[in-house]
Image (tube, coloured by chain):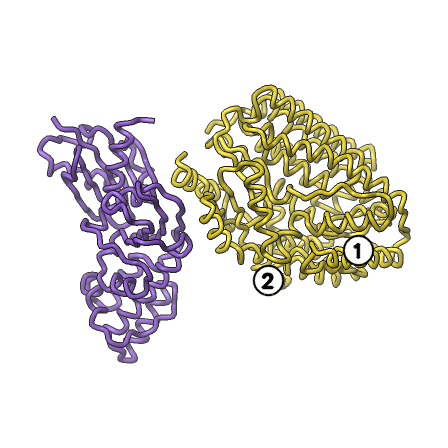
Chain colours: A yellow, B purple
Amino acid sequence: MSILPYKTDATYLRWAAKNLLRISFLGVDPGPVRILQLLKRYPWVSAFLKVNKLMGRLMGNRRGVYREVTGYILNRFVDVFADITRDLDRYADRIVWHEDLVPPEVIYAMGLNPFMVEMLGIVLPLVDVAQGERLIDEAENAGLPADTCTLPRISVGLGLKKHLPPPLCVVTSNSPCDGGMTSYAFLEELYHAPTFRLDMPYRYKDPEGIAYYVKEMKKMIAFLEEHTPGRMDWDRLRAVCEERNRATAYELELWELLRHKPAPLGSDVVFLGHLAFALLQPGRPRSTQVFKQLLEFAKESMRSGGGLPDEKYRVLLWNPPTLIFPELFSWSEQEYRTTMVMDMLTFNRHPIIDTSTPDTMLHDLAQIFMQGPMAQHTRGPVEYFFEDLFFIHEHYSTDTIWMAGHIGCKNTQALLGMMREKCRRRDIPLLIIEYDLGDSRVVSADGIKEQVTMFMKTVMGA
Amino acid sequence: MPKYWAGCDVGSTTGKAVIIDDSKVVATSLVPSTLDPEKTALQALKAAIDQVPDLESHEACEYLVGTGYGRLEVPFANENISEITCHAVGACHLDPSIRTLVDIGGQDLKAIATSEDGTVKEFAMNDKCAAGTGRFFESMARTFQITLQEFSQLSLKSKNPTSITAQCSVFAESEVVSLIAKKTLPEDIAAGAQQAVARRVLAMARRVGINPKFAISGGCAKNEGLLKVLEKRLDVPLARIDFDPQLIGALGAALMAKRRGSDPI
């Protein structure tokens, strides 16, 4: 496969320049001295300088609108991380760590600065896999078992090196996995920060389960009020939820367009968009703007024949994307004419939040988080997992399911046998990619390519 | 002059070639692998071509498909196709009722779920470990200082198979040495080794679902001791294919050559 010479491509150069401009603006706000201090204190910030390399890898051989939107989403991603970096300085005295399955909307509505610890375990392998691997080793050397998921191992590695911003307190949960929970025990000890653990019930779809979680969220609010200067501002939460609703409406419309063959967009554009603007920074005006813009791009792409006009296979990706090899999809688009139209981390039941009272807001947030990506798929009865899997498969008319079989995920490893049997009964070609989410030394990018190639040629007849 | 199609399977321990015409297999060959896969392929092809008076060289074949682990190093093949596809096509050509096939090669183990025409529906493979492969049997035979053929027959005499616990070929060898030192009967140890491999084979096969008929291909399918154990443990009939199981991959490659050569994509 020949890749477009992206370093001289106009689309690439334009977005690369915008990214560098945004990053260099950190020299103005918070300022040159502060940014140097931040870089010294939090070396992971420097990983963002590699974003243009990532962009080139993701753009691959994409053309037209699809190429443009890849640049756009990466650029908005840079915006988010530039803001997070700036806020490490601006709101250093209001930082609250939260785990990825704890609603940041509530923390934000309390006038606090939410910092998702898992964010770095996701972003570092994407942008700078070697930096992530050093942190994995750090955590392992400190006693975190080698078979723990690499994502929490990166979090612990950062904690051990004191590369995480000191929090006022920590809010975490009993999800998504034992490894995640263990990592917070380490971090709690390392930072001596008061920690609250939200308890997600087993049968979280039952009304009793939702009511229980609402109570847990109220306890979390009381905890935050006790340990931080933040106070619950229900009007602010309403504004956040309403903004989230506006973004959700656009995202749901975008997802409808993804059902179209050929799909207008797909893969990293969709999952990076959801990751940054629905999971990391939900309820912000920028998130709404991004989903609105993605929708516009999708419509434009459809008018010009779709993201991959000669799309041959539609892929549903299960489990988080292959972070150590994010260009898997742009590569397979080119090699096998596949479009990854939907993935587990993106798809969410997404109810529109009823903002009429504090209780209705908490109720709907509880539903969103308990039935959302990762939570829904790593906890509770197995039926919930398979209901989602096969619903998405049918809804998006996918030809094959690719299971990113991250070996560190005990929860999903335990399900592989059942997954194989259920797919077999439905005659759905299933590829289980054996690899590690954050450690390329376990299976390299080439190893992933080999597995995909073998599957596509042998089973799909590509 | 009749038309010929060829398949060449460059395996880790042997190179195999099969030549077919419009209706039947006209030549087969099996040679030990050399360090150079291209050389192995040439030797295997030459040995087969020498059996067909009409053919002067592999270039005279209509189409040539390379398969096996060394297939990418066979530059003169018209096409390279994975051994999973070729084994499935070859086995189903010989017995269309086969639905589960396990290819036990010299250095890997592959379970394949297939349809009537040999289309691969699912597969699972172990290519990172020698457990349950020909290498394992080679190491066992070496420990007993007997040939592979003698080893495969030895287990048939056992009345009380010993349990071999180690899954890893290296550790299994140590375990066998210890058992020999304890004066355990050689046939019981051999039977234990066959059972250990059978467990491994069945575990791999279960990943793709075991459906009748079940068949084994690859060099290890010549191991009668293993087939007996599998027959006992399987809930479905074990197909006995009337063709050298070691050549099934090359046969599949030749059949694929005929398909592709007759109907180029």
Residue A420: percent from left, percent from top:
47, 51
> Residue at left 53%, top 24%?
A309
Judge from the rendering whether residue A452 lies leftward or rightward of residue B221; answer left or right.
right
**Residues tagged by mark 2 and mark 1 found on one chain of the structure:** yes
- Quarter of the picture holding the C terminus of chain B: top left
- Check disc 2 and give the amino acid type: Pro
As rendered, which of B28 and A164 lies closer to the eye? B28
Question: Is any atom of residue B43 visible in this view?
Answer: yes
> Residue at left 76%, top 33%?
A288
Q: Which residue is mark 1?
A: A214
Judge from the rendering whether residue B249 lies leftward or rightward of residue A102; answer left or right.
left
Quadrant of the rendered structure where residue B121 is? Answer: top left
Q: Residue furthest front?
A: A207
Looking at the image, do the residues carrying marks 2 and 1 touch, with CB atoms under 8 Å apart?
no
Q: Residue furthest left?
A: B53
Q: Which-is-in-front pick, marks 2 and 1?
A: 1
Instruction: Answer above or below: position of B140 versus B35.
Output: below
As rendered, which of B29 and B247 lies closer to the eye? B247
